Image (tube, helix red, strand yellow):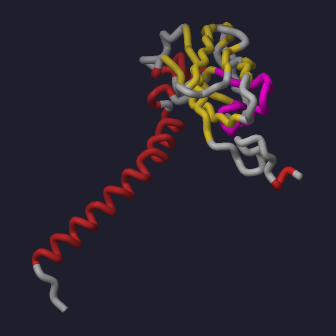
């Protein structure tokens, strides 16, 4: 059965829409992966362990915290800044408090500035890797363990960086299954 020119054109347009939709759907995870691997856009790297090389040169690390509009938590860095030798592991804490009368789930997004330092800021352990759920009135300390890769001193753009800022923004997300419902009832999975 032969298709008319109009039907062929419509079929091609549908194909283009499907391909464009698939590319748009894949763009966010692929861009995220690209940023994590390259440090592009200030995205820190993820390391399994600390550096085996520690330099005498130091770098100041500043800590910043913010919340997405509507996120009811209070969220702040415990320490505003610290100075470390390049390659030395650091441990910083952020404090989160849920002042509401309901459980609230959150997920942190993060970045590093200046962007040239993003690929050299390596996180070993971080609260941003998992969703966080705080019960009504709950207050928690959330650690982040990190180091600045000694390779930063060999990068023509990053070697003059003396201060790096690690920023987190918390976003409210849907409560995972198994947590109390928002209307005050309890989920059957918890009993």
80 sits to left or right of 117: right
Q: Residue furthest left?
A: 5
Give the vertical position of 24 relative to 160 (above or below).
below
Figure quadrant of residue 129: top right
Tell me residue 42's x, y (percent). 49, 26
Residue 120 within the segment the image draws in magenta: no
Q: Nearer the viewer, residue 185 or 164?
A: 185
123 sits to left or right of 178: left
Tell me residue 147's x, y (percent). 66, 22
Q: Nearer the viewer, residue 34 or 97?
A: 97
Main SS type for the magenta part? Answer: strand
Report the residue at 29% width, 60% height from top: 17
Q: Please give the count of numbered marks on the rendered protein.
A: 0
Report the residue at 33% width, 63% height from top: 18
Q: Which residues are magenta?
A: 124-147
Report the residue at 60% width, 15% height from top: 64
Give the vertical position of 64 relative to 101 (above or below).
above
Tell me residue 56's x, y (percent). 66, 8
Residue 89 visible in the shown view: no
41 sits to left or right of 85: left
Residue 80 visible in the shown view: yes
Q: Nearer the viewer, residue 72 or 150?
A: 72
Q: Residue furthest bottom?
A: 1
Tell me residue 97's x, y (percent). 74, 22
- Classify the position of the N terminus by image quarter: bottom left
Residue 139 within the segment the image draws in magenta: yes
Give the vertical position of 20 relative to 170 (above or below).
below
Report the residue at 77% width, 41% height from top: 184
Figure quadrant of residue 107: top right
């Amino acid at each position: 059965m032969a298709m008319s020119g109009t039907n062929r054109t419509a079929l091609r347009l549908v194909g283009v829409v499907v391909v464009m939709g698939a590319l748009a759907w894949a763009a966010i995870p692929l861009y995220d992966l690209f940023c994590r691997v390259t440090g592009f856009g200030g995205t820190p790297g993820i390391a399994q362990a600390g550096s085996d090389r520690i330099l005498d040169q130091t770098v100041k690390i500043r800590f910043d915290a913010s919340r997405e509009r509507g996120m009811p938590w209070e969220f702040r860095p415990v320490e505003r800044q610290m100075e470390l030798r390049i390659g030395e592991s650091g441990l910083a804490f952020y404090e989160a408090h849920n002042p509401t009368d309901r459980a609230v789930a959150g997920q942190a997004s993060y970045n590093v500035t200046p962007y040239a330092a993003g690929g050299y800021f390596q996180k070993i352990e971080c609260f941003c890797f998992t969703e966080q759920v705080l019960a009504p009135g709950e207050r928690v300390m959330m650690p982040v363990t990190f180091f600045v890769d000694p390779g930063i001193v060999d990068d023509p753009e990053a070697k003059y960086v003396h201060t790096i800022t690690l920023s987190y923004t918390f976003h409210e997300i849907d409560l995972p299954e198994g947590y109390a419902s928002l209307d005050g009832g309890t989920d059957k999975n918890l009993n």
